[in-house]
Amino acid sequence: MNIKLAKSGLLALCLICTIAITLVFGNMPGISQESSSQPSTASTSNSMMNYIREWKGLIEPFLVITPESPLPGLYPGTILPGIRFPDLGQQHVEVGTSITYNSNPPTSGPHYPYPAAWGIYKDPPADGFLVHNLEHGGVIISYNPKKIKDQKLSQLRQQARSLSNFNARVILTPRLNLDTAIALTAWNYLQKLNRYDSTAVKVFYDTHIARGPECQEGLCAG
């Protein structure tokens, strides 16, 4: 009888230990029944920040969180602002390759394999990167630092921030060889301004943003 009780007690003790081990180790951090195939928000954000840090001259980044962004509506018959230039194609070339374009700033053509980070720059990225941004539906605002400075530059930067709140595919950058005060570029389109005109900047942005060759109904690559 005593032997049977001892065996019963031993079995009960083993059962309790098994349950306890399951509860403790089953809830340990890092141990789960299923693994997620989606990257965490933190890891995605860290990747973006590491990418942004690579860009010399970038003083204020604009983050594009998702490929799909709002697309401003266009009235039927809307005439797109700017001069339309012949499309030079979308060929990718190695970084550092010398490229000849048909406008200043360029609006299409061969470009480097990845775009510049979106945002406000104090030193300009190479055209090979910027053309890739245009391909991804971006609008680039280039300015001559000799003609746009102080208060006007502050106003232009503030407008770029405001536009980025709607769709962050915007780059504001100085351009030393610009023959006008401001140049607005989108894929195949260029509009030059001899002074800062906030209305002209807004209209160009509204009619061209997220309409590059790699965009469809506001859904853009990159």
Image (cartoon, helix red, strand yellow):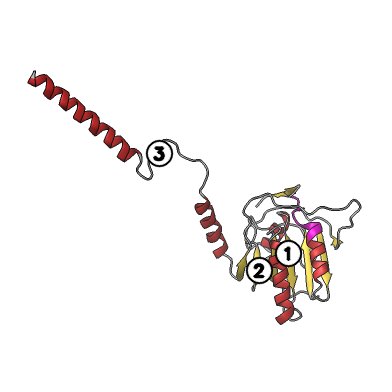
Q: Residue furthest left?
A: 2
Residue at 89% x, 57% y is 79
Residue 211 lies within the magenta run = yes
Q: Quadrant of residue 181?
A: bottom right
Q: CA distance from mark 3 to mark 2?
A: 43 Å
**Element at badge 3?**
loop
Task: Examine the rendering and report whether any part of residue 188 can be seen.
Answer: no
Residue that badge 1 annotates: 140
Residue 188's spot in the image, x, y percent? 80, 58
Residue 61 lies within the magenta run = no
Q: What type is the residue that disc 3 sits on?
A: Ser
Residue that badge 3 annotates: 32
Residue that badge 2 annotates: 120
Given residues 25 and 56, the one toward you in this image is 25
Residue 47's spot in the image, x, y percent? 53, 56
Q: What type is the residue that disc 1 sits on?
A: Ile
Q: CA distance from mark 1 to mark 2?
A: 10 Å
Q: Quadrant of residue 108?
A: bottom right
Given residues 101 and 153, the one toward you in this image is 153
